[in-house]
Amino acid sequence: APTTTDTANASDASEKLITVGFAQIGAESDWRNANTTSMKSTLTKENGFNLIFKDAQQKQENQIQAVKDFISQGVDIIVLAPITETGWDDVLNEAKSAGIPVILVDRMVKVSDESLYSCWLGSNFEKEGVTAANWLTDYLKTQGKDKEKQNIVVLQGTIGSTAEVGRTKGFDDTIKKSSNLTILEEQTGEFTQAKGQEVMESYLKKYKDIDIVVSQNDNMSFGAIDALKAAGKKPGKDVIIVSFDAVKAAFLSMIDGDLNASVECNPLHGPKVAELIKKIKNGETVDKVQYIDESVYSTDNAEAELPNRQY
Ligand code: AHR
């Protein structure tokens, strides 16, 4: 069952506070923890909210149960970060029948009826994949390697999550234009450091000629870096590593020269979610899709940017 890590019950909430049930995915990465902190530090009593937070421990059934619990508690609004895109129709229909609006954050859902949620706020994951591929091809040019054959292995995130689907599509479609680049294999590392390391170890046993690792989040990159070092390779030099998220630890890794680049994925959703909740509760219309601004960082600008990182 999902764990309750924070909060009051909907029933204790003062009349004036907006009771929000937030079904978070888990605590699988630095990004996720920064996202949770942003939501918890914004949806506070001082700001007019009574937050009920559930950590689903990376399991869709726990998230579905959390949403059902929020419905029976009679929350004012539900915020859901869906782990994967499919499987949400039934529970979102239950929320709709109960008259409880749902805001989706971070990842998207594939549902038959778009009116099952009020709006979505998150990253343009496909664009992030394109950015990673463009960074890589530009970098290979600066290294005089744009004509040399380069072998890539990919550590994917949770299969079927918008972050995995978008980053895979954006990256794969873009590198198809470069005939020197070959993807040897794509496998999931579940967005965790431990699994990223495990999959990288198996890649290193299987392939002797890996030139590039594309890792769909920083925590898996840290696992891959450990696996490469244990195999006697120099990450960032013998093997180029392109990552996603751009969390603080990734900046330190770029400054050390282990990680070559990280495409930013912004987890600071709290303030925008608070604004959306208030608008929806006031009956105002909001844009259905809201993208958050993002950039790309590399060994060239990591040191200068580090002091600005909040997470
Ligand atoms: O959905 C966003 C992704 O989920 C982040 O890239 C990753 O770190 C997290 O676990």
Image: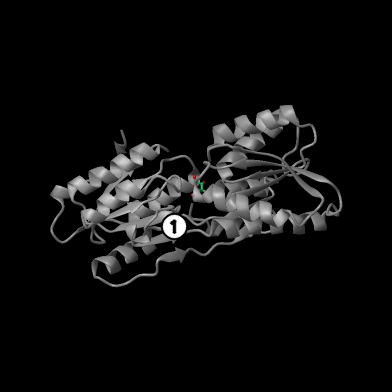
Q: Residue at x 26, y 44 (%)?
A: 68
Q: Quadrant of residue 204?
A: top right
Q: Is residue 220 above or below residue 98?
A: above
Along the line of sight, the residue nearer the viewer: 252 or 205: 205
Image quadrant assignment for residue 127: bottom right
- Answer with left or right where residue 189 lies relative to residue 4: right
Residue 285 at x, y = what percent? 32, 72
Residue 46 or residue 174, whichever sits in front: 174
Q: Residue at x 73, y 28 (%)?
A: 206
Q: Quadrant of the N terminus?
A: top left
Q: Amino acid at mark 1?
A: Leu
Picture quarter containing residue 6? top left
Measured as percent of width and height from the top left, residue 126 is found at: 58, 57
Q: Is residue 228 visible?
A: yes
Question: Mark 1 = which residue?
Answer: 268
Along the line of sight, which residue is nearer the eye, 85 or 298? 85
